[in-house]
Amino acid sequence: MSTQTPELGDVVRVRVRVPSDFGPVHSIRTRSNPDHEPHFTDATLVASTGGWDWWEAPLRVENPVHGYRFLFVLEDGSTGWLGSSGYSLIETRDSEDFKFVSYPAPPPWAKNTVMYQIFPDRFARSSEADGRELPIWAEPAEWTDEPIHIGPSTARQFYGGDLLGIEQKLDHLVDLGVTMVYLTPVFPAHSNHRYDALSFTTVDPLLGGDDALISLVDAAHARGLSVIGDLTSNHSGDAHEWFTSSHLTPGAPESEFYYWLDPEQKSYVSWLGVPSLPKFNWAAPELRRRFIEGEHSVVAKWLKAPYNFDGWRIDVANMTGRYLDQDLNAEVRQTIRKTMIDVNPDTILLGESTNDALGDFEGDGWHGAMTYANFTRPIWGWLSKRVEKSWFFGLPYGTIPSYTGLDVFEAHQRFAAGFPWRVRLHNMNALDTHDTARFRTSALDGAVPVAFGMSVTLPGIPVVFAGDEFGLVGDDGEHSRSPMPWDERDASASTIDLYTQLIHLRRDHVALNEGGIRWLHAGEDVLVYVREHADECVLVVAARAAFDVEVELDGHPELLWGETDATDSRLWGDGPSFTVWRLPGIVLPSF
C-alpha cells in the first residue's frame, strides 16, 4: 500500500508481488466493494526484480473500512482470487478481503511494543503495605502461600501487593526489555482481582491511592515504559456507588445505568449471572457522560495529568453494550476512542474478545484484540501435552486438543487474516494471562522457547504475564496468579535470560515489529515463515520435533538466534527448537 493511513476519498496504490515462475499472467484487477457494490480497477506490471513481478492498481477509499482483493486471469484462461486468507480458485468472501481503514490510526509507538501484564496484588509488596488496615473481605496471606483457586476464598485471599512495590521493581522490567506495563484494575473493590469496582474515580487505598499511581507512572515513563490501565465497561461491582444508589430505589438518577428485571429494582442482569457484577445499560446518556464521553469522564480522567495512563485495556469488550435485542457495542467503543483522541491521541485502546474477534475489530475503536483464537489456543494445541483440562480457554473440550503444525497455520489464518493489517499488528499474542492456566504447566519438554519465540515473531504485541519469566506454573486462571518469587531470581536466571533474549530479538528487528508475513512451510512438526520489510527480512523456524525442509530463500540466511542449520534451499535440525535468521530486505520499486 502506498499509505497505511488513508483518509476517505484518497486514491491509494496497492501492489501485489507475484513469483516470476507462478505462470504466465494475462491480467490482474482489484475487486473492491464500495457501498456493497463491486468495483474493479486494472493493475499494471510496474517492475520485475529478484524473481518477482510487481503489479500495481489504484483504489479510491470510499468507506471507512474498504475491502479489496485481486482477481488473476492467467494466459490459459484460468482465474484465481487473492485475499487475506490466501489464493483461491473460487470466489472469496468479502470478510476475506484485504482492508483499508480510514479511522484514526493507532499511536506510532504501539506496533513496537512488548507487553508485561501485572496483577497488582501478586507482583510486589512495599513496606508501606504493612501499615494498611485490611477491609473485612480480605483474608491475609503470606507471600509464599500458594494461591487458593477453588472455593469462596479465591477472590478474598489477599497478599497485599501494591503500586509502590511495582515501582520498586521497574528495573527488572527494563532489564527484561519489555516496553509496556498493563495493570489489571487498580480501583477499590471487594476482591483481590478488583473487577468488581466500587468506584472508578479513585485508586484503591490498599494499593497506595492516587499518589502511588502518579508516582508509578512517572517512574515508568522516566525509564521509557508506557503504562495502560484496565476498565470494566461491561459491569461494575454490586457495591459500586452507582449501583447502591439505584438498587431497590426506582427513580434514582443511576437507575438507567443497569438492567432491572422487576419494578422494585431488586433483581438485575449481571455478567454471566454473577450477582456481584451488575451489567451496564449503555442506552443511558448519563452513564456515557460520566464514564466514557468527554474530558470529564472516567476514560479521560486517568489519561490526563497527573495520572497519564498511556491507554486502556477494556475487560470483556465483546459483551459491552449487548443484551437481548440491544447492541450498542460499536457506539461504546467509538465513543471511548473519540474521548481518548480528544484528551491524548497518543494512547492505545485494546479490547478483550476471547474468541472470534473479527466483527468488532475493524479499526473504528479498538486498536487490537486480547483474544485466544488466532494465537493462544493453536499454540497450546501444538506444543502442550495432551492432559485433562475441564476448561480450555472457554471451550469445554475436557482435554488440551492435539494439533499439528498445519492445524496451527490454518487456525491462525482463519482467525487472524481477516483483521485489517494495522489491527493485526496490535493484537495481543499471549501464551497465558491472569485468566488462564500458565503455558509451562502442561507444555512439552523444551517447548517454552518455541511458544514464546512465536509470540515475539508473529504479527501482534508479545505478552509476558508476570512470572512467566520465572518459570511459574498454574492449573487455571486463579491458580496462575502466584506472587512473584523475587527471592528465587538466581535460580530462575536461565529462564529470565531466555525471555530477555527473545524480547530483545523482537525489539531489535524492524521486520518483526511492522514487516509483512509470508508462510513458507507448514508441516506436522515444523512451521516456517518470514517477516518481510524493505530494510531486512527475518526467517523463523519453529519446530516441536526433528525436521528437514526444502525451501526457496531470497539470499543466504545469517543466524540471529538458535542452533539449527540452514542453506539457501534447506532447513534442518532437532526439536523442540526455535531458530531465527536474517535475510536481505525486499527490494521495493518506488511508488
Image (tube, rainbow, N blue to C red):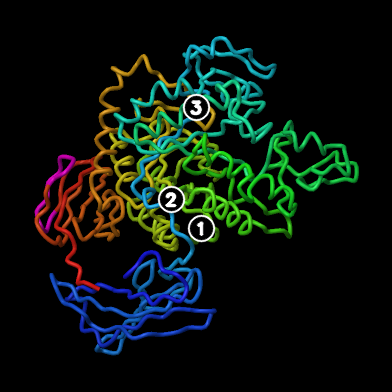
What's drawn in magenta, residue-wise? 559-570
The answer to whether 200 appears left or right of 178 in the picture is: right
For the point 12% across and 52% down, which residue is it? 557
Q: Amino acid at mark 1?
A: Phe
Q: Give neighbour class at mark 1: few <14, some 14-19, many 20+ (Cα, 10 Å).
A: many
Location of residue 379 (image quadrant): top left
**In magenta segment, residue 283:** no
* Above or below 280: residue 165: above
Give the camera-side residue of 358 and 124: 124
Residue designated by label 2: 427
Relative to the observer, which residue lies in front, 304 or 238? 304
Badge nearest the viewer, 3 or 1: 1
* Extreme-front residue of the structure: 305
Q: Earlier in the sequence, mark 3 or mark 1?
A: 1
Residue designated by label 3: 481
Q: Position of residue 229 (x, y in %)?
A: 52, 38
Q: Which residue is mark 1?
A: 361
- Under tag 1, what secondary structure? loop
Q: Which kind of residue does numbered mark 2 sit on?
A: Asn
In the image, 244: left or right of 48? right
Q: Earlier in the sequence, mark 2 or mark 3?
A: 2
